[in-house]
Image (cartoon, rainbow, N blue to C red):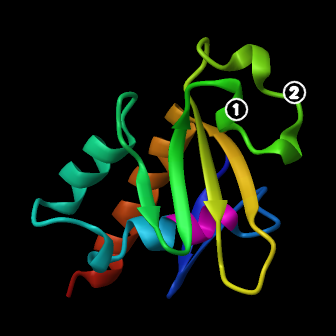
Amino acid sequence: MRSVRLESPFYNVTDDPKRVIGDFLGFALSPGCVSEQPLAEELAESFGPGGRGMRLPVFVAYRAEEADDVPEEFGDRFTEEIGRRELWVLTNLMPGRTPDSVVIEGPELRHLLADAFRQRAAALSP
């Protein structure tokens, strides 16, 4: 399982060479990307097994429920796992760059979110 470390203002994640997961954590934990409800509740609702994910102009995170939900760059690598495992697709859509994607299992995604959230809270506390 990957680990995360907050090196303000960035989240560095092990085994994340294109920084897709680190960028995702930064967007997901930024105050401008959440609703009026507390951040912990918003994250649990958005990224739980039945969550809606996150869609921003520069980043998307969604649950892969069909083979067509996985970007072509992964070929058939995850085809048999869809429906049996909770897979999430994270895609960085930064302007001027080719989109980069990562497929990650739900429990690992939530583990990284929780750890990054704790680190963020510690960094913001007086």
**Residue 37, percent from left and from top:** 11, 60
What is the CA distance from the residue labelled 2 to the residue labelled 1?
Answer: 10 Å
The type of residue carrying mark 2 is Asp
Q: Position of residue 65 (x, y in %)?
A: 56, 26
In the rendered image, is residue 58 in sight? yes
- Could you tell me the amino acid type at mark 1? Asp
Q: Which residue occupies 65% across, 40% down?
A: 104
Q: Which residue is mark 2?
A: 76
The span shown in magenta is 20-24
From the viewer's side, name the closer residue of 97 and 44. 97
- As drawn, the residue found furthest toward the front would be 68
**x 65%, y 67%: residue:** 92
> Which residue sits at x=81%, y=72%?
98
In the rendered structure, the answer to whether residue 88 lies left or right of residue 2 reads left
Residue 40 pos. (x, y %): 23, 54
Please give the residue where the numbered disc 1 appears in the rendered image: 68
Picture quadrant of residue 64: top right
Q: Main secondary structure of the magenta part?
A: helix
Residue situated in front as seen by the camera: 1 or 38: 38
Q: Is residue 1 visible?
A: no
Farthest-out residue, left: 36
| Secondary element at image label 1 | helix
Q: Nearer the viewer, residue 112 or 38?
A: 38
Q: Quadrant of the C terminus?
A: bottom left
Residue appearing at x 41%, y 65% in the figure: 28
Dot 1, crowdedness within 10 Å: few (<14), some or many (≥20)? few
Sequence-earlier tag: 2 or 1: 1
Q: Kindly report which numbered mark, 2 or 1, lies closer to the viewer in this rendering.
A: 1
